[in-house]
Image (tube, rainbow, N blue to C red):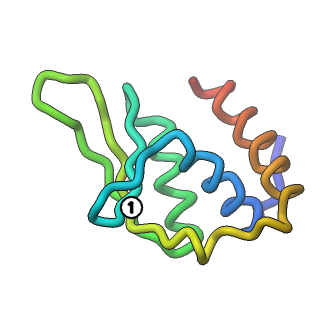
């Protein structure tokens, strides 16, 4: 089944939710880490769609932990009046994660 392209607002809302799974470092970078890179690659593509660069790297030489980092200005993607977009984004991407992970 083919889906309509996601609006930037839905992508932003989903990313705001995803950022709750990560950390904000002192050098103003958001970091999300996990075992494997599949979900991180999806986040990287979504960030690119709204104009942000992100990079993925393996943390440590003998660990199976990968990190996505990005310099995200949350003030530019946060819109508290768009709770509906947050719900839509979570529903859509929740389905994607269930299919792929």
Q: Is residue 72 above or below residue 86?
A: below
Q: Residue at 21% across / 36% down in the picture? A: 59
Taking the image as shown, residue 18 lies to the left or right of residue 2, namely left
In-front residue for pair 80/12: 80
Q: Position of residue 7 (x, y in %)?
A: 77, 67
Image coordinates for residue 3, horizontal then vertical, percent: 82, 50
How many callouts does the rendering have?
1
Q: Is residue 57 left or right of residue 98?
A: left
Picture residue at 78% right of the left edge, 53% below the top: 86
Quarter location, residue 30: bottom left
Residue where numbered disc 1 is placed: 70
Looking at this view, name the residue that lies furthest to the left: 61
Image position of 50 (left or right of 88): left
Image quarter for residue 24? bottom left
Which x, y percent locates residue 40? 45, 43
How many other residues sit within 10 Å of disc 1, few (<14), some (14-19) or many (≥20)?
A: some
Find numbered disc 1 in the image and state the secondary structure of the residue it sits on.
strand
Between 1 and 16, the one nearer to me in the picture: 16
Lateral position of residue 99 relative to residue 18, left or right? right
How far from the left and from the top, in percent, is residue 71?
Answer: 39, 67
Q: Residue at x 76, y 50 (%)?
A: 89
Location of the C terminus by quadrant is top right
Q: Is residue 64 above or below residue 15?
A: above
Quadrant (top left/top right/bottom left/bottom right) for the N terminus: top right
- Quadrant housing residue 27: bottom left
Nearest the viewer among 84 and 57 is 84
């Amino acid at each position: 089944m083919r889906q309509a392209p996601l609006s930037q607002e839905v992508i932003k809302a989903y990313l705001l939710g995803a950022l709750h799974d990560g950390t904000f470092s002192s050098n103003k970078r958001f970091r999300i880490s996990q075992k494997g890179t599949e979900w991180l690659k999806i986040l990287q593509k979504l960030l690119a769609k709204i104009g942000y660069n992100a990079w993925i790297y393996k943390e440590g030489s003998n660990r199976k932990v990968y990190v996505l980092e990005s310099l995200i200005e949350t003030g530019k993607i946060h819109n508290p009046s768009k709770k509906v977009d947050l719900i839509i984004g979570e529903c859509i991407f929740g389905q994607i994660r269930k299919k792929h992970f």
